[in-house]
Amino acid sequence: MAIVEQDRPAGPLALPAGDGEHREREPLGVFSRPVHARGWRSWLFTVDHKRIGIMYGAAALFFLILGGVPALLIRAQLAGPNGTVLTADQYNQVMTMHGTVMIFLVVMPIGACFINYLVPLQIGARDVAFPRLNALSFWTFLFGGLFLNLSWILGGAPDGGWFSYAPNTGVVFSPTHGMDFWALTIIITGIASSVGAVNLIVTMLNMRAPGMSLMRMPIFTWMALVTQFLLLFAIPVLTVAAFLLFFDRRFGANFFDVSQGADPLLWQHLFWIFGHPEVYLMILPAFGIVSEVLPVFARKPLFGYPFVVFSGVAIAFMGFGVWAHHMFASGLGPVSVAAFALATMFIAVPTGVKIINWVATMWGGRLKFDPAMLFAIALVLQFTLGGLSGVTHAIAPADTQQTDTYYIVAHFHYVLFGGALFGFVAGWYFWWPKVFGYKLNRTLGLVHFWWMVIGFNLTFGFMHILGLQGMPRRIYTYADGMGWNLWNMVSTAGAFILATSFIVFFVNIFVSRKHKTHEVDPWDARSIEWMTSSPPPAHNFDEIPVVHHLDEFWYRKYAEDDDGQLVQIATGDEVYRKELAQAEQDHAAEHMHMPSVSYWPIVFSAGLPLVGLGMIFNLGLAVLGGLVSLVALFGWVLEPSVAPEDSHGPAPASEEEAVSVG
Amino acid sequence: MSRRRDARRWLLAVGVGLVLVLTACAEDAPQDTLQPKGPEAQTIHNLIVPIFVVAGVVGLLVFAAVAFVMVKYRAGKFHATDVPEQVHGNPKLEIGWTILPAIIMAAIAVPTVSVIFDLASKPTDAMEINVVGQQWWWEFDYPGTNVVTANEIVIPAGEPVVVNITSRDVIHSFWVPGLNGKKDAVPGRTSSITIQADEPGRYMGACTEYCGLSHANMRIVAVALTPDDFDEWLANQETAAAAPTGADARAGLEVFNGRGCGACHMIDGAGVTQQPQVVPLVSGVAPNLTHLMSRDVFAGAMFPLKNPDGTLNRPLLEAWLRNSPAMKPMYPQGGRGMPAQGLTEQQIDDLVAYLSTLK
């Protein structure tokens, strides 16, 4: 291959640049760029969107354990009446941490994992617009998550619920430092989300391959774009709310102090103006994944692509106008309740459109039931159930019976677990061979699938009944004789089945990784991220594809013959080799300039939890943390955009070698 | 073919069995939301049941469609090189299935909005009860009388009762599912709902807004009495507690006063005249004990005060007086909940003797 891959940056867009066009001054000591192309330091300082995506996924799986163990403790405590596994105080901490960790440190980061990895590949870009900011997002999220979990050993985890309703989260009612950790974590991870949103929006709007109009953008990227706009507008509201809460707690502000005339509903409005778009920004990436997986395994294009795109956009818009349906019991008055009930009902319309379009995508196809496809179909069905129970909440009078019962717990687990997480697992099975060069074992995948479907539905399905039988949420115990014993026991059994299904998944990863095939196109896929090697090189594509169709890759493999019949004209591998030959011919003399790795994103992020700890325990420490981040910002600005040419070791022979260290 | 018929029979059997199991289990659920006991709850029930049916039908259609597609279009039925027609969409169809759910939603919206306003309208000249939530029990006071009680909300059967709900500390939610939906108790605000029980009886409820440590132990019992029984109950509640006569009960009153129990608990007419000490935003107030023995439950309706035969559940009450924080998670050092009193067994016996005179 004639393209020399070197870690020499040439501006943020990393476009190929001619050699020797600019002479750089020798950079000063600490402000030189790191040059590690492999080894653990290459991961710490990386700015490669693919490595950052992988790290997002790995970190999210780690937090999945930290959020899953509390879930199992909850189910163990509630297995029977008058449980004694946890005390009330422990239960409240465990419940709060389960919700907070799963939402902010598992589901959102898994979304970020897919979006970071796939978006530049799907739009034919070499990286995101601001690679160092991308690294900053990841490390800030990771350190924020670790900071939150420090609370377990520093005086107690937060105990106010993931929703943190004032005034129960005030310092009077929650005197440990748990809620301080919670509020600061929200602020820190909020930085990660907001920075990431700006970065990815710029990337998607500006860096698409030639010919890729917005309506030729792969559906996953579309949903990612919508998600990032949701983040951009929703996260700041939560950040403000967390600041208000923290100022109340730490500095005696009176934002939520009723005796000073505050209205505690202020918190609920702020929280849910964030909280409802949050629901959609967690589910939309999974919708995008399913909309990619179903067409590939049905060998048909996504049915009604424009409808699916616009229904996603409509969901996002309407998602900002339905927040008060979380507050139907809080005494808003009938006019507000009626308005929000109507808005909520009509959000069912675009959601319903998506579901019917997915079914129509499969209709008339040639369905292959690989694990990715099965997880995607499970999402369609389970999300349908979650969506239908969601419609019943929109019936505000009925919601006053259902809200804050296990019916709601069932509903949002069907949406977030049966929906989002099943979609993510589908995505893992689907893109795994592209990312790591090997397929996950099909048999183990099927075991994983059935075990997870059974476990999931046992755990959460019967919670509908528990809720309708009047079992309130967030209770650490319940009395005998309420009629709740049987289904709680079933649910607990299901939870442990569900937990073991993830062990099957981890075993599958471990077993399958020996069988690398580096197949370019194992599923006969449709979009251009499959038109590069598996795993892709650091620069993603040797030749940036020129896009003529929505399903560009498919139409390079299939064309109509003289009778109008669709026939295969090339295999995916042949298409890839053709591109490779083209690149050889066009760019043989050029160097590929990719952004250099950088010390500063991780240093900046490392300062933030110090600021957090300092705000809680010792303001001196906060100053120190602030200085660390400040120095990082100066380093960031002052580091050269180009590392000296002679400081490079030999480029890795293949990306696989670089990736395999992780 | 026969295999498929077998499968169908199986499905039917499983379905019928499931329905039987589900309905059988609902019968002994005293907090069931699907067994309305009064007109407000019935209104909600009448609204939601048809919507459950519609949702069920839609769900079944989606499941059936997916099952059909999965059987009919599985790749194994076709030749491996066979490429299906690349259908990109059908705008007419899609507009159709955009409008269809919109129509269903519009049809659901009309009765929903009308019920929202129905339930929000207050009946004229109905009896009112003020409900105050606090960590972790409920106080009920009857405006126009001096009656203040706890944990059990006593109402006349067959009549609408307006409850005005607020809180002294954090947000709670008042919910007796047999009588109406829930309404949050928000400090600084008062929200009203109407409840009515058609028949005399005891209806279970609970706090349903997470309110801290003992949220699970903040339960409610709505006691509906016939109008005559209710008048009798109210008349009794309005009388002050009689001075104790027995020696041990008198000793118990002395313990009560000597230990400063009256700082939080009020007992009318027993020489205990301190008003409850209202600590803003921290529950410093404890249940009014003037007619403690007229109630069947105590400590946030967590424990039965009476045995099934109506006699005092002495061991539980004694255990409570011995060490209340061990029985119910509370936060007495923060002024919320009853602290352990360090009473001697003699003092506990005396106190119980006194308390059992508070009929």
Image (cartoon, rainbow, N blue to C red):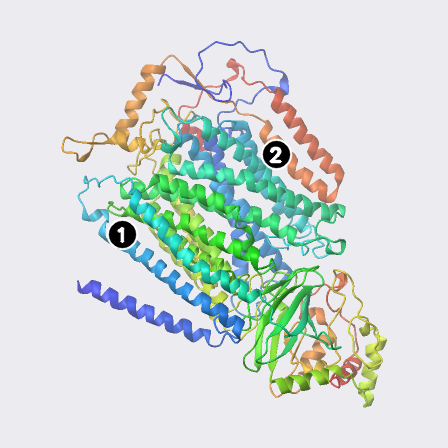
Q: Residue B226 carries which label?
A: none
The answer to whether residue A355 of the structure is visible from this angle is no
**Rendered image: mark on residue B70:** 1
Q: Where is residue B7 in the image (x, y as percent from the top left)?
A: 25, 64
In which image quadrant can residue A567 be found?
Answer: top left
Query: Which quarter of the figure has residue A559?
Result: top left
| Secondary element at tag 2 | helix
Q: In this view, does B84 lie to the left or right of A515?
A: left
Question: Pointer 1: residues within 10 angstroms few (<14), some, or many (20+)?
Answer: many
Q: How many labels does the image show?
A: 2
Q: Which amino acid does label 1 sit on?
A: Met
Label 2, on which residue?
Answer: A605
* Residue B130 occupies quadrant: bottom right
For disc 2, the neighbor class at 10 Å (few under 14, some 14 to 19, many from 20) is: many
Q: Horizontally, is B339 left or right of A207 in the view?
A: right
* Chain under callout 1: B
What residue is shown at x 55% (from left), y 18% (from top)? A641
Q: Where is residue B189 in the image (x, y as percent from the top left)?
A: 68, 60
Which is closer to the viewer, label 2 or label 1? 1
User: What amino acid type should be assigned to the residue bearing mark 2?
Assistant: Ser
Would you place residue A514 above or below residue B5 in this image?
above
The reply to whether residue A16 is in sight is yes
Chain where mark 2 sits = A
Give the image location of residue A178, x and y in percent.
Answer: 66, 51
Quarter of the image with the N terminus of chain A is top left
The answer to whether mark 2 and mark 1 are in CB contact below 8 A is no
**Farthest residue toward the left?**
A563
Q: Nearer the viewer, residue A197 or B347?
A: A197
Q: Distance between the residues labelled 2 and 1?
A: 48 Å
Towards the viewer: A55 or A555: A555
Could you say where residue A614 lies in the image, as x and y percent from the top left? 72, 40
